[in-house]
């Protein structure tokens, strides 16, 4: 029900914008989270947004990433600026009733999109 796009290869300092298209079956009142998982590491919360527009960011991405949503288009975005090699990961969007940082707090997940940042 969630489809991510926009990943790719970028040099350090560059930017990417990820998109997450939701289906009509995902309530627009759900919170949306962006998670990432690097090889050999656990999936971690990066950013999230409530239906009201309130946002929350993990410390490693604060000031560089911006999450937004267009409820009319059923799409959530993650604008990533000043990318670093340590941002390399598979990025997932997820939908859930509440904006939380734990992956098990989300009901619906996308398939993920690879982001690779070269040094």
Image (cartoon, rainbow, N blue to C red):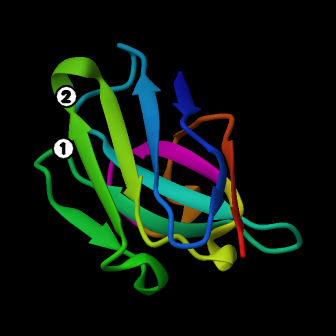
Q: Residue at x 50, y 63 (%)?
A: 14
Q: Which mark sits nearer the N-terminus, 1 or 2?
A: 1
Q: Position of residue 76 (x, y in %)?
A: 34, 38
Q: Position of residue 112 (x, y in %)?
A: 67, 41
Left or right relative to 92: residue 98: left
Q: Residue at x 42, y 16 (%)?
A: 23
Q: Residue at x 38, y 25 (%)?
A: 26
Q: Which residue is mark 2?
A: 71
Left or right relative to 63: residue 6: right
Q: Secondary structure at mark 2?
A: helix
Tell me whether circle 1 and circle 2 mark residues in contact (CB < 8 Å): yes
> Which region of the structure is painted magenta?
91-100
Left or right relative to 44: residue 90: right
The picture quadrant where one finds residue 87 is bottom right
Residue 111 counted in the magenta span: no
Crowd tier of the residue under label 1, counting other residues whose Cα lies within 10 Å: few below 14, some 14–19, many 20 or above: some
Q: Residue at x 56, y 32 (%)?
A: 5
Q: Which residue is mark 1?
A: 51
Residue 98 counted in the magenta span: yes
The picture quadrant where one finds residue 43 is bottom right
Main structural element of the magenta stretch: helix, strand or loop?
A: strand
Q: Is residue 28 above or below residue 87?
A: above
Q: Which mark is residue 93?
A: none
């Amino acid at each position: 029900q969630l489809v991510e796009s926009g990943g790719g290869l970028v040099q350090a300092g560059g930017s990417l914008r990820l998109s997450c298209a939701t289906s009509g079956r995902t309530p627009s009142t759900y919170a949306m989270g962006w998670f990432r998982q690097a090889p050999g590491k656990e999936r971690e919360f990066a950013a999230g947004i409530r239906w009201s527009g309130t946002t929350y960011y993990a410390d490693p991405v604060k000031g560089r990433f911006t999450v937004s949503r267009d409820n009319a288009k059923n799409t959530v975005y993650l604008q990533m600026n000043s990318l670093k090699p340590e941002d390399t990961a598979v990025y997932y969007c997820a939908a859930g009733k509440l904006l939380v940082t734990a992956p098990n707090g989300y009901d619906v997940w996308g398939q993920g999109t690879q982001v690779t940042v070269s040094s």
